[in-house]
Amino acid sequence: MKPIWYFVGLILFLMGLILVVSGISLLSSGETHKTVLGHTYPDLWWGSFMTLSGLIFILVNRTKTV
């Protein structure tokens, strides 16, 4: 049985990928930014951070068993 941190990493990885894809689509569509810091593309930053964090969790816990 896998530890809970493996599944936490899996969820972080998948949610991060969704955010990155959403950020890329918004970046390529050329929409105007409706928020003050929208020009910094926080969905790309947070999506990248979550994807990387999830990947680290998955790699560290892939061989551990409970």
Image (tube, helix red, strand yellow):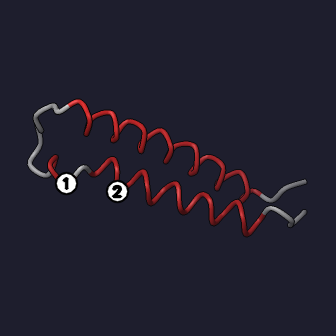
The kind of residue tagged 2 is Trp
Per the image, the residue denoted by label 1 is: 40
**Apparent side of residue 4 relative to residue 42 in the rendered image (left or right):** right
Q: Are marks 1 and 2 in contact (CB under 8 Å)?
A: yes
**Quarter containing the C terminus:** bottom right
For the point 15% across and 31% down, the residue is 31
**Apparent side of residue 26 relative to residue 57 in the rendered image (left or right):** left
Image quarter for residue 20?
top left
Name the disc covering residue 45, or none.
Answer: 2
Q: Nearer the viewer, residue 63 or 66?
A: 63
Residue 48 on image: x %, y %: 43, 56
Q: Secondary structure at mark 2?
A: helix
For the point 80% across and 59% down, the residue is 3
Residue 59 on image: x %, y %: 72, 65
The mark nearer the N terminus, 1 or 2, is 1
Furthest residue toward bottom: 60
Q: Secondary structure at mark 1?
A: helix
The kind of residue tagged 1 is Thr
